[in-house]
Image: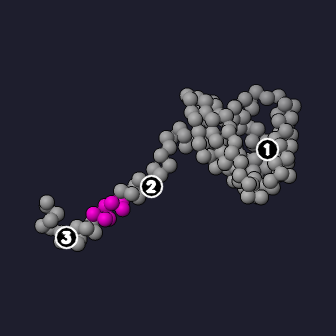
Amino acid sequence: MFLRFLIPMHSRFNLLTFLLAMLLLLAACRRDGLTAEQRSVRCAAEKCYSLLADQRYEKFVEEISYADQMSPEYRSQMVDLVHEHVATEHSRHGRMLSAKAVGDTIDGDMAQVFLQLVFADHTTEEVGLPMVKVDDEWKMQ
């Protein structure tokens, strides 16, 4: 009512349109609708697979929840196994280009993150990555 006397009709429409646009923009800032915990676990899972894509196998193995308890020999074997797995995938689909979290289920300190992998031959594959929270940090299980 107060606006009717201060602002002409066409200006009120522009103001209303502007306010509506701002509300939509603010909603877009929360576009994913994810909780902080979901963002955190998804980010950790994507980080793990980006280490694979970058062929940083030692760092990938360090993201396993019990990595600090591995003997040097066992750690070396894990690195070799990861390298072999990536080489097999590379021969089938080419290099992994990206990994994006597309879903998750979280139950306390445990989670399953679903990642969509995109390869050089344009194939996609969805994988589930079990995660566990260790000292407030998400790690591969």
Looking at the image, is 86 positioned above or below residue 18? above
**Relative to the observer, which residue lies in front, 110 or 70?**
110
The quarter of the picture where the C terminus appears is: top right
Q: Which residue is mark 1?
A: 57
How many neighbours does mark 2 have within 10 angstroms: few (below 14), some (14-19), or many (20 or more)? few
Could you tell me how far apart the alpha carbons at marks 1 and 2 are, in whole angstroms? 36 Å
The residue lying at 76 percent from left, 27 percent from top is 69
Q: Which residue is mark 3?
A: 9
In-image side of 114 versus 90 (left or right): left
Magenta-tinted stretch: 16-22
> Can residue 140 be found in the magenta stretch?
no
When asked about the image quadrant of residue 16, the answer is: bottom left
Mark 1 touching mark 2, by CB under 8 A?
A: no
What's the residue type where badge 2 is placed?
A: Ala
Mark pair 3, 2: CA separation: 29 Å
Q: Give me the disc on residue 11.
A: none
Q: The N terminus lies in which quarter of the figure?
A: bottom left
Q: Does 51 sit above or below residue 109?
A: below
Residue toward you, 137 or 97: 97
**Three-letter amino acid code of the residue under disc 3:** Met
Q: Percent position (x, y) of residue 109?
A: 58, 29
In the picture of the structure, the residue carrying the numbered disc 2 is 28
